[in-house]
Image: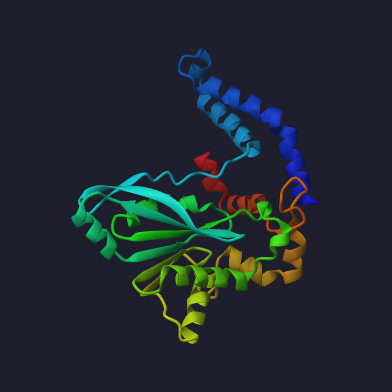
Amino acid sequence: MLYQLHEFQKALLQPVSSWARAASEVFINASNPASKVPGSDRLAASYELLYRLSKNYKKPEFGIRAVQAHGREIAIHERTIIAKPFCNLIRFKRFSDDLDVIKKLKDDPAVLVVAPLSGHHSTLLRDTVRTLLQDHKVYITDWIDARIVPVDAGDFGLDDYAHYVQDFIRAIGAENLHVISVCQPTVPTLGAISLMASAGEKTPASMIMMGGPIDARKSPTAVNNLADQKSYDWFESHVIYKVPPSYPGAGRKVYPGFLQHTGFIAMNPQNHLQSH
C-alpha cells in the first residue's frame, strides 16, 4: 500500500507543486521587489524543495554531440545496439572525415561502463562517458525503470543481472575490451566475468570496480550494520512493494525509488540540509 499512497500523495500535491514553483520564482526574480527582502533566498529554496518533492522527473539525456579526440573534434552518435526488457546496451559511435583520425579511432580499445541499476539513471555517468570517448569506443548499460517493464517480461534477479552483463560482453567482444562497474553493479559484474573465466570463455582485458561493496565485511557502514541486524523477511515486508496500477509494470514487486532517496537523506541528513 505504501507505493500506492505515495502516488496518491503526488497526485494530490500537483496543484501545490505548481504554486510552489511560481512562488520560488517570485523570490529569485531580480526584477521583483520581493527578491530584495532579507531571507528571500531561503524562502525561494524552501518553495523550490516543495516543488521538487511532487514534480515528475523525466529521464535526462546524455546529450553528448561531440568530443575532442586525437586532436580533432569528433561527432558522436548515440545508438542502442541491444535492447532487452530491463536494459539497453548503448554505444556512443564516433565519426570523423579525417582518414588518419579514423584509423586511430578504430585502434582505440573498447570500454563497457556498467552503470548502477537502482537509485540513478545511467546519465549520472555522463561526464565519465564524455571523458572516456577521447580514447575509447564507449558502451554503457542503460537500465530501464522496472515499473514500466510489463509483468509478462518476467522477473529480474541477480542471475539475470549477471547474464545481461555476460551477453553485453560477448556482443562487444572480450578482446581489447575493458569493463568499468560503478558502485552497486561491481558485485554482479565480478560474478559475471568470474563465471565466464571458469567456463573457459574469453574475458575482458581489465575489470575496474569503483566504489562497490566487494567485501562487505571490510570497513562496515551503517548500511552493512542494518543488513546484519535485520532478516530477509523484514526487508521484504518493509521495503518491497508492488507497482501501482497506473504503470505498465503494475503488480511487479520492486524496491521503490522514493525509499532509496529517503535512505540517502537519512544517512547524511546534515549534509542534505546544508546543501538545501
Residue at left offset 48%, top offset 50%: 123
Residue 225: x percent and y percent? 62, 68
Residue at left offset 49%, top offset 80%: 196
In the rendered image, which quarter is residue 154 located in?
bottom right
Residue at left offset 42%, top offset 67%: 172
Residue 98: x percent and y percent? 21, 51
Q: Specify whether residue 39 is in view.
A: no
Residue 176: x percent and y percent? 34, 72
For this orientation, the residue located farthest to the right is: 1
Along the viewing direction, whichever of 156 and 174 lies nearer the viewer: 174
Residue 217: x percent and y percent? 54, 75
In the rendered image, which quarter is residue 133 located in?
bottom left
Along the viewing direction, whichever of 132 and 222 lies nearer the viewer: 132
Residue 264 position (above or below residue 21): below
Residue at left offset 63%, top offset 36%: 55
Residue 238 position (above or below residue 30): below
Along the viewing direction, whichever of 258 and 246 lies nearer the viewer: 246
Left or right: residue 109 versus residue 43 is left
Left or right: residue 5 versus residue 225 is right
Q: Specify whether residue 43 is in view.
A: yes
Along the viewing direction, whichever of 95 and 188 lies nearer the viewer: 95
In the rendered image, which quarter is residue 132 located in?
bottom left
Left or right: residue 58 versus residue 233 is left
Q: Exactly how many numbered labels are in the figure?
A: 0
What colour scheme has been applied to the protein in the rendered image?
rainbow
